[in-house]
Amino acid sequence: MSETTLSGYFDYNATTPLSNSVKSEMLKALDIYGNASSPYSRAQESKALVDSARENMAQLMGAETSQMFFTSCGSEANNWAIKGSLARHAKNPGHIITTAIEHPSVLEPIAYMEQVHGFSVTRLVPDVEGRVREEDFLSALRPNTQFVSVMYANNETGALQPIGPILEEARRRAITSHTDAVQALGKCTLDDRILAADYVSFSAHKFYGPKGIGGLYVRRPGELAQLIHGGGQEMGLRAGTENLVGMAGLARASEDCTQLLPEWESHYRRLRHRITRKLQDSGLGIEFNGPQDPSKCVGNTINFSVPGVRGEALAALLDHKHQTQVSIGSACSNNKSSKSSHVLVAMGLGDERIQSAIRMSFGRYTTEDELDRFVNNLHACAEQLLGISTPS
Ligand code: PLP
């Protein structure tokens, strides 16, 4: 499948396909079989691949290679940052600040630290557009605040959080900070202040790399406890024989991103502007869930509700009739029993609006024509569900 033929797919926040350049590096890596930890010459090629992949990741973040660690995914990176950092406070558990709109891979380890280890937690509630307020963060700070975790961009609404000021303030007060940048990397230029964070998580399959590999930026590796014990891989902090093929893919995805992000970012913004206008003009009375100001949002994500139509039914009909895929929440929340988006609930939206919500996320090769076709198909499906037209 070529990179340009993913017609009808609008769920790039759930996952992206492999780009051709990534795929080709991964295919080459399949023939590199030495164990990177072995001392003999045959392992040198593997070791070189690990080192150069780490360099690409470091370049992408503007960090030192000694601060970049491979993980198996974004979820592991989040769990590691939270549990690995808070381990040193286990004997005097203090206060954590996070938000009510984090991904479950942040919400759940923090709830675990609260329930099992006795930390107290403040979960910041966003405004109606899905952004937490800097002033709420400032008022939540306590003398015993030990850890802050605020996501960079929300996966359901695309809302960018005021991450620069939050990270700087945490740093000024010597509070350990983490940001989940899984949905920001590869979609928007990161704020220079991101390196004020102690930990930054990311995941290759969200920016055209493979599934099964992610990364964690660690400002001071000496302060992070191990999550996976065993051999001495990852500078002694994460055991397990290296996923060379995944690393080759992540390395190439990072390199492409370092070079081409400005181009993709403006493509996303153009597409978002166009579909916003088309949806506004659709006559369906569409309500947008998320920041109205496009500069407060990643360009590839748009979340909206079609009044009177259940999102689940609309998504299913779009898939069935037009082979078109959108999401009604995050991909992970589809595995959970509760179907209401915790993000839209936290924003204070009404139940009907939440049940009608659709998340659409575009990719690098999505075209304006595809978006126009999408709006036409959406219109026909919504009318069918509203009983305005008869099914064809
Ligand atoms: N954080 C956010 C904001 C996400 O959207 C996701 C995945 O959707 C994750 C973390 C988890 O990443 P992974 O799928 O690599 O575990």
Image: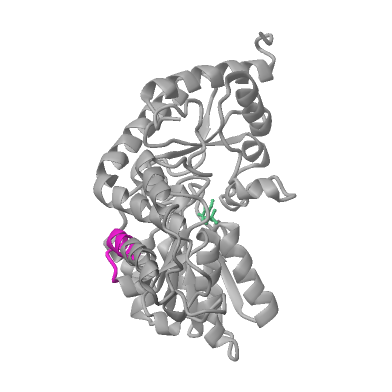
Q: Percent x, y for residue 13?
A: 49, 44
Outermost residue, right direction? 337
Asked if residue 192 is positioned above or below residue 257 in the image, the reply reads below
Name the foreground residue: 142 vs 225: 225
Give coordinates of residue 20: x percent, y percent.
38, 39
Magenta residue check for 148: no
Q: Quadrant of the N terminus?
A: top left
Nearer to me, 273 or 38? 38
Residue 300 picture location, percent across and down:
41, 39
Q: What residue is shown at x 51% (from left), y 59% (from top)?
A: 74
Classify residue 77 as left or right of residue 198.
Answer: right
- Figure quadrant of residue 91: bottom right
| Residue 312 located left or right of residue 242 | right
Q: Residue at x 75, y 49 (%)?
A: 337
Residue 25 in view here = yes
Q: Which region of the structure is painted magenta?
A: 54-64
Query: Is residue 57 magenta-colored?
Result: yes
> For this view, does 201 lie left or right of residue 82?
left
Number of labelled discs?
Answer: 0
Residue at the limit of the structure toward the front, as seen here? 41
Relative to 91, is 323 above or below?
A: above
Is residue 203 visible in this depiction of the protein? no
Asked if residue 140 lies left or right of residue 64, the reply is: right
Q: Most prominent secondary structure in the magenta stretch?
A: helix
Residue, x 61% and y 26% (percent of image)? 319
Is residue 80 positioned above or below 303 on the image? below
Q: Position of residue 277 (x, y in %)?
A: 40, 26
